Image: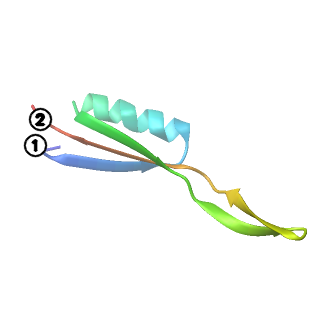
């Protein structure tokens, strides 16, 4: 990662989130931000429609300052 470069990665589970965090530490990434996004799908259940959750998505970003 070049100096003052920015990196963005996504993870769909906690294992990948941890692995990305470890890589960020090795790359000495700073100003790390983590955003979790949830997506739901509308499904019919009986006479009702409900929002069924899909897997969460984590978006990580950071910068190399030094």
Near mark 1 (Cα within 10 A), the count class, few <14, some 14-19 or many ≥20, is: few
Which residue shows up at 57% across the image and 59% down it?
39
Q: How is the image coloured?
A: rainbow
Q: Where residue 53 appears, x then y in whole percent?
A: 67, 55
Near mark 2 (Cα within 10 A), the count class, few <14, some 14-19 or many ≥20, is: few
Q: In the depicted view, which residue is nearer to us: 32 or 48?
A: 48
Q: Where residue 40 appears, x then y in whole percent?
A: 63, 60
Horizontal side of residue 55 vs 36, given as left or right = right
Which residue shows up at 39% across the image and 38% down it?
20
Sequence-earlier tag: 2 or 1: 1
Q: Do the numbered discs 2 and 1 sit on residues whose CB atoms are within 8 Å?
A: yes
Q: In the depicted view, which residue is nearer to us: 53 or 29?
A: 53
In the image, which disc is placed on residue 4? 1
Horizontal side of residue 42 vs 49, given as left or right = left
- Label 1 secondary element: loop
The residue that mark 2 highlights is 65
Q: Disc 2 and disc 1: Cα gap in Å?
A: 5 Å
Which residue shows up at 12% across the image and 35% down it?
65
Q: Where residue 29 appears, x then y in whole percent?
A: 23, 34
- Label 2 secondary element: loop
Horizontal side of residue 50 vs 45, given as left or right = left
Q: In the depicted view, which residue is nearer to us: 21 or 57?
A: 57
Task: Residue at the far front: name it.
Answer: 48
């Amino acid at each position: 990662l070049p100096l003052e470069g920015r990196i963005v990665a996504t993870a769909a589970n906690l294992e990948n989130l941890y692995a990305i965090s470890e890589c960020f530490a090795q790359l000495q990434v700073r100003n790390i931000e983590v955003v979790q996004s949830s997506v739901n799908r509308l499904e019919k259940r009986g006479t009702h429609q409900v929002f069924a959750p899909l897997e969460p998505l984590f978006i990580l970003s950071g910068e190399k300052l030094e």
